[in-house]
Image: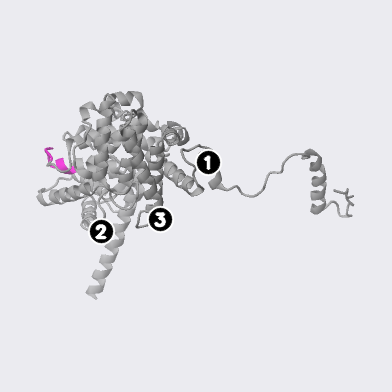
Amino acid sequence: MALQFIVQNPSGIGSSDRRIIRSHVMQGKNAGKPRQSTKKKNVTEVLWSDLCLTSFPQELDSESTALMHRWFFDISDTLFPPEFCTKFDIIKSIWVNFIQADEAYFHSTLAISASYVDFFQRKSAISSKTLHHISQAYALVNLKLSGPSSVSDSAIAAVVSLAIYQQVHHQPATGLIHLHGLYRMIQLRGGIARLMQENRALALKPLRLDVELAMQNGTPTLFHLAEVPVYPVLCDPDSRQFPRAAPWMPLILLDLFSFSSLLNKVETRQRLRLDPLDYTETLVSLLYRLTEVSPLRQAFTNPGLYGDVTYLAMLAFMTTLLPEYTRDGSSCPLLSDRLGSAIQDLFLTASGLSDSDLPFLLWILFISGISVLKLKDYPWLLPLISETCATLELDNWVAIGQHLFQFPWIFALHDSPGRHLWETILFLSCGTEAQQVVSMV
């Protein structure tokens, strides 16, 4: 580039002249250095970089890589919510190792990923890509189960992934068949306690599937509570400060309150984030205790006015902490039916609920409404909430919240849908009042 002499204007150096000066000065400093582009980087490419550098049993096109990326990172945030847990490095996890080393797990994961995206895009039919990968997965799993590595970690992971595929497609009965196979495999390995010692992250998968499928199918868990080596590690028995505790309330309700109080605390303090596996083990432990006491297809034996409703409401509370793989409807219709019937029975048979009962009843109604009871199927729920609030003289969300927060209530998960439920009640009541005024004119 030819030299350019800068002539100073009488009024001084202008902005254009200053740019030319800086250009000349920086040419010497930047000689031989690559210029960094000022264009905005493609975020997608940055996010995919880890998976793009990963070697797979088969070559992946960009679409398949994108599907797998979306599944892994979305489900990771669902299983280990960043509001509560430290970041789970999915790329360094055993699951990515299985994808790299095991072709059966590779294909089943791609089938799940494709299904997951299909559901989000509201596609009614199963895509050819999904069918290809799931057929490959089944064929490879069958080969693996007939060989010398039939109870290896990778074999267990592959069958787990087949069960998750059925969860995505809302086929819990088929998922239960896979779970029975998993149970036999784990027993041949020496039992669930041994697997928990050898590979905790892997062992927690079939355990969570066990309790989820028990809730969906209304069947007892395959792994019995006495043999399951999981504990509510994040429920501090010394911190059960339950303002509304009553003598009849079961101990597990106090544990739910302790756990929800901890989650409320860690949400606001980054340094208190929880270990993802501790978080999962606590969830699984609480679910086993609840499903062990109350199989959904059997009559409850819990005494007291709130016996049935209390345990069903606690199960409904726990569903808000479980992954909803497709977000297209309740994955626990049995729980919805039983809880809806139990609430109606309570109001029909209970004679003269005392004032001390009403705050807990209000919690049951709100938890039910933001979890498993869909308003279109249970239209009587909103009037019950409205009547209960009126009896308690509660006419705004702040006052209602003060009552709900005395029971298990997780701000990050429950506050927004709870407020929306209350606003829906207000909107409907305003419409009713307007109709009454019109009819009087």
- As helix, strand or loop, the secondary structure at mark 1 comes to helix
Nearer to us in this view, 12 or 207:
207
Q: In the drawing, what numbered circle is on residue 52?
A: 1
Q: Residue at x 15, y 45 (%)?
A: 354
Residue ID at (23%, 73%): 439
Q: Residues within 10 Å of mark 2 (few under 14, many from 20)?
A: few
Residue hosting label 2: 376
Name the mark nearer the viewer: 1 or 3.
1
- Do tag 2 and tag 1 residues touch (Cβ < 8 Å)? no
Q: Residue furthest bottom?
A: 441
Residue 272 in the image, given as x and y percentages of width and height: 42, 31
Residue 360, x across and y down, in percent: 22, 43
Q: Are marks 3 and 2 in contact (CB under 8 Å)?
A: no
Q: Nearer the viewer, residue 250 or 227?
A: 227
Q: How many neighbours does mark 3 have within 10 angstroms: few (below 14), some (14-19), or many (20 or more)? A: few
State the image coordinates of residue 392 (x, y, percent, origin top left).
22, 49
Answer yes or no: is residue 20 visible: yes
Quadrant of the image containing the C terminus:
bottom left
**Quick check: 273 above or below 1?**
above
Q: Amino acid at mark 3?
A: Gln
Provide the residue designation for mark 3. Answer: 121
- Which one is earlier in the sequence, the residue at label 3 or at label 2? 3
Q: Is residue 183 magenta?
A: no
The stretch of residues the image draws in magenta is: 300-309
Crowding at dot 1, Cα within 10 Å, few <14 / some 14-19 / many 20+, comes out as some
Q: Amino acid at mark 1?
A: Cys
